[in-house]
Amino acid sequence: MSIEIIVNALFLGIITGMVYALSALGLTLIYGVMRLINLTHGQMLMLSGFLSYTLLTLFNIDPIISLPLVVIFFILLGFLFHNSLIKPIIKAPLIESLLITYAFGMILENLAIIIWGVDYRSIVTSYSAYSIKISTFSISLSRLLASIIALSVSILIYFLLVKTKFGKAIRACAQDPIASELMGINYHKVAMLTTILSTSIIAIAGPLLAMIFLIYPAVGGMYTLKAYCMVVLGGVGSALGALIGGLLFGISESFAAVLLPSGFKDAVAYGLLVLLLLIKPTGLIKGYK
Amino acid sequence: MNSKIVFKNIDKIFITVVLLLLLLLPFFISSYYVHFLIILFIYMCLAESWNIIGGFCGQVSFGHAAFFGIGAYAASLLHVYLNFPVIFAIILGGLASSFLALIIAYPFLKLKGPAFAIGTLGFTEFMKIIILNEEKWTHGAAGFENPVTTYLSIPKYGWYLGALIILLITIFVSYKISKSKFGLALFSIKEDLEAAEALGINSIKYMILAFTISTFFAGLIGGIYAFYMTYIEPYSIFSSALSIGCVTMSVLGGSGTVIGPLLGALIIQLLNEFFKSFLAQTYLTINGVILILVVLTMPEGIISGIRKFIKSKY
């Protein structure tokens, strides 16, 4: 294997990993505050990708420009999702939250099949054909744009968590809901805002993922598992861990694509997940709350 | 005197009558209903076997379909390539899925909680990709065709009988477990793991045993499915929807009870059959809605809902 291939795979992995990292951040936030795994995560990513696709094909709005529109829709969706489904089960046994979020994902997936059909689609923009060439390797412009947007949004959210009062409240609730309530934090309000923050992140990550990969209704389950794999990779419930986990995941996937036969590329995600859970279920990086 | 004996053994008589009816039923109904019953038995068996690890022991597995699929593929491969008789192939299929479960059981069950659920979900996807890419023996995505074998020279009856027998054994075993000391240990692990361990229960040993038994029956019924359908393909078998389907049926009826999963499977299958007729492939939406409603309104399941209702009346 030549050095060029290695550099190319590394570069591609980082580019994809940045978008992955953003999507993992959405999953880890909900887990941190409410201790539940949102199995609708992938289906929501799929839905936001399809919304952006529809805005592009019907009204010819560029996916990057339409991001705010998708975010507004997902803030509404997050509000409804939290109040109707998440709120009643915050303190319920684990199986209930898993089943409820999975069932909601199933509904979204089948609605997507009804609306858009089962075909594979891709977002084709005016600049999709362009690519930037640096010596031997080239990278398509839309991929590069997607990863830059993902990186800037991730940094923004990271500072929101670390620097602002709202971020402090989220971290407090993640550490100890009861103690934070005693300190005068309205836990249910924070939980709701966290869900909305998470769905807004999804609204940005979904179209960006759709710019890189194909979208189809059944893609959601794979995204959920991949995002969970990244979260475990980085350390469950940690925002920084999710970002690093996403990057590592992107890199390992792109190396797998080079080294293994093409069909096995997706097996890496699941193989890695199973392996990680077996060896180090607490994650590679120590939790940063 | 005589009537007293009859009254005393009423449950045994009832069971015998029901069994006889079930055995003779296929001769009186059309082949469409026989097909419905076979599929119903398969789902009942899946829900009932999931219940051993998920309901009794409280370790929620999202990968039951993987073991169903391993049983299905192992049985068909053994039959087609090594000419094993169908019955042996099916039993070996069950053992194969049980064996694989045994390998992953120790590290997986140590995870507990959500990580176990996600781990088993990942395992299902992993198995699917392995089968999809292994084209020499299993023909990958094209699916695997079994030669059509009709048992006992009556169409479908052989598979009907096979599914029924495996279902009955599964019910019998889970009934025995629920009444045994082993079952008590499982219940205590579900209620409070630390307390159970403090009382001297080797929790991981019991969990592994429950997991192996549970997956054995999933593998067995997988073999029946493979031979009955004569065609299996990885997408529909190693699907998370099927795994969650097992969970849904159990939770709907009442997980942790013996009758619950059977009732849940019956309700879900009837509803699916009803909605399939005008919703085509998207009938799963209805499943999702049912699942949400059940978890929000009666998380303990229908059986315990009925029990509570009776208790409050009398």
Image (cartoon, rainbow, N blue to C red):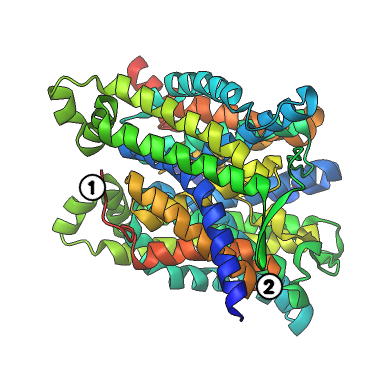
> Label 1, label 2: how many angstroms apart (C-alpha)?
46 Å
Q: Amino acid at mark 1?
A: Asp
Identify the chain of the residue marked 1, using the numbered disc in the image.
Answer: B
Q: Secondary structure at mark 2?
A: loop
Image height check: is B88 above or below A103?
below
Is residue B53 at all visible to an observer of this figure? no
Q: Is residue B184 or residue A95 the one in the foreground?
A: A95
| Outermost bottom residue | B82
Q: Position of residue B301 (x, y in %)?
A: 45, 32
Q: Which mark is residue B44?
A: none
Q: How many marks?
A: 2
Q: Residues within 10 Å of mark 1 (few under 14, many from 20)?
A: few
Q: Quadrant of residue A145?
A: top right
Q: Quadrant of residue A27?
A: top left
Residue A17 shown left or right of residue B60 in the figure = right
Q: Are marks 1 and 2 on the same chain?
A: no
At a point 62% along the width and 37% down the height, the residue shown is A207
Q: Is residue A74 or residue A83 the one in the foreground?
A: A74
Image height check: is B314 above or below B79?
above
Image height check: is B261 above or below A231?
above
Q: Secondary structure at mark 1?
A: loop
Q: Residues within 10 Å of mark 2 (few under 14, many from 20)?
A: few
Q: Which mark is residue A261?
A: 2
Residue B222 shown left or right of residue B186 in the figure = right
Q: Quadrant of residue B238?
A: bottom right
Q: Position of residue A110 (x, y in %)?
A: 68, 33
Q: Amino acid at mark 2?
A: Pro
Image height check: is A211 above or below A135?
above
Q: Position of residue B167 (x, y in %)?
A: 59, 54
Q: Which residue is mark 1?
A: B192
